[in-house]
Image (cartoon, rainbow, N blue to C red):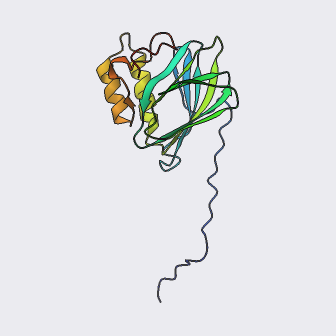
Amino acid sequence: MKNETDFLTDQLENKAIMFAPNEGELLAMGGNSITFKVTSDLSNDQLGIYEIKLAPSTIGAKLHYHRFMDETFIVRRGTLTIDLADGPIQAYEGAVVYVPRMTPHGFSNQSADEVIINLIFNPGQQREGFFRGLQSILTDPVIDAAKYLKLYQKYDSFPVNADNMLPVGAPGHHEGNG
């Protein structure tokens, strides 16, 4: 008897996952945090979804770009400043900012209040490894710029200006970023 395969019927599965508020792996860095929601492993590397909490007056990332992934910011609370090549934009609560690959961008919280965003990477490209490495590097007593750049490049992030790439100092200071 020949092996019968049904090419006409979909094989349905129940694989839906819900993440409640504050649920997911949490990485803390000072007053900032990243919570993993949908990881590369869960999505077969199709996307990564993360909750980011930025303390007041905090740089998330200086101008950089990705060669192989798109990034989407969904502002859930507060006002996020998105730096673009032609200047910053203010993304208010409820805003969605889509940044396709090869588009220089950075982000910061320039306000006096906490900002909460959902950050989506498509594809996911194991971005969780980047965030774990970021936590390790940024919580060292002295930030090693060479190690930071190596982490960036491993995970498809390329600074526009490698001499001014570290997320330190006051947000809104753009000298040397363009």
> Total of numbered circles in the picture?
0
Residue 98 image point, x, y percent: 57, 38
Judge left or right: residue 19 versus residue 99: right
Coordinates of residue 131 in the picture (x, y in percent): 45, 29
Q: Residue furthest left?
A: 146
Pick the front one: 132 or 53: 53
In the rendered structure, the answer to whether residue 1 lies left or right of residue 57 reads left
Q: Name the residue at 35% across, 29% down.
A: 151
At 62% from the left edge and 29% from the top edge, which residue is drawn?
117
Reply above or below: 140 against 95.
above
Comparing 78 with 127, the one in front is 78
> Residue 165 is drawn in which quadrant?
top left
Dividing the image into 4 quarters, which one contains the C terminus? Answer: top left
Above/below status of 32 relative to 124: above
x, y percentage for residue 82?
Answer: 55, 26
Which residue: 42% across, 37% down? 66
Q: Is residue 35 above or below residue 145?
A: below
Image coordinates for residue 76, horizontal then vertical, percent = 68, 29
Which residue ends up furthest to the front in the rendered image?
Answer: 86
